[in-house]
Amino acid sequence: MYRKDRQSEPYTLRAKREGYPARSVYKLKELDRKFHLFKKGGKVLDLGAAPGSWLLYIAKEVGEKGFVLGVDTAPLKIETPFNASFLQKSVMEFKAQDALQYMGEYDAVVSDMAPATSGVNGLDAERSLKLSFRALEVAVDVLKSGATFVCKVLEGEGFPSFVNAVKRDFRTAKLAKPRATRKESSELYVIARGYEKRG
Ligand SMILES: C[S@@+](CC[C@H](N)C(=O)[O-])C[C@H]1O[C@@H](n2cnc3c(N)ncnc32)[C@H](O)[C@@H]1O
């Protein structure tokens, strides 16, 4: 019953109609409308890319001269666009060189990673936070100076420490909760601009 409800949700139906494999694309679209995240010719690393809605959207936004690299433990459920590549592996095993080998440093890293939910709130928040910190580590290794980082994070105990860590490496860090986020969800997105490369 619960599943059926989710499948008939307006955002899920709209995603199906518009050729996206997941409703999460509307969260990214909203963030992009507000923060202008992608530019033509841009290079973007998409962490937690499966089933592929964000990847499809970003590939369209960066255009034929741009590039998107998706990383996920799960496979994509779309045909990889011509200006994108996909690595099926955990971000925990991912090395900066895996991303840099394509065309050097990136203009943006986005992470929509989420752990498989256990149903235990504290545990899910802890796992999610670990993925967010790992996404930040990867971003610091692959971004150009001035670049953008967008990261999903669950509100929970460690959340302020993550935002503070982001602020150490980026000029600004804002929080946003897109309308397309499910009401019961405690997820937020950190939008960090102006990466300040050290050393
Ligand atoms: C909400 S989904 C992402 C949806 C995606 N942005 C889209 O629009 O299609 C979260 C993803 O995080 C991935 N994920 C979880 N742990 C991961 C890890 N350690 N490394 C890479 N991806 C991971 C999951 O496999 C899942 O596909």
Image: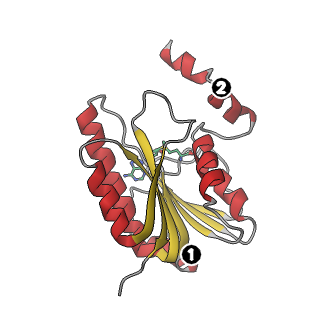
Q: Are marks 1 and 2 in contact (CB under 8 Å)?
A: no
In the rendered structure, the answer to whether residue 13 lies left or right of residue 28 reads right
Distance Cα–Cα, label 1 vs label 2: 37 Å
Q: Nearer the viewer, mark 1 or mark 2?
A: 2
Q: Quadrant of the C terminus?
A: bottom left
Closer to the camera in the image, 195 or 139: 195
Dot 1 falls on a residue whose secondary structure is helix
Q: Which residue is mark 2?
A: 10
**Tag on residue 102?**
1
Which residue is pictured at 70% across the width and 59% down the height?
A: 61
Which residue is pictured at 50% across the width and 30% down the height?
A: 182
Dot 2 falls on a residue whose secondary structure is helix
Residue furthest top as drawn: 1
Residue furthest bottom as drawn: 199
Q: Position of residue 127 (x, y in %)?
A: 29, 45
Q: Is mark 2 within 8 Å of ligand 1?
A: no
Observer able to see residue 51: yes
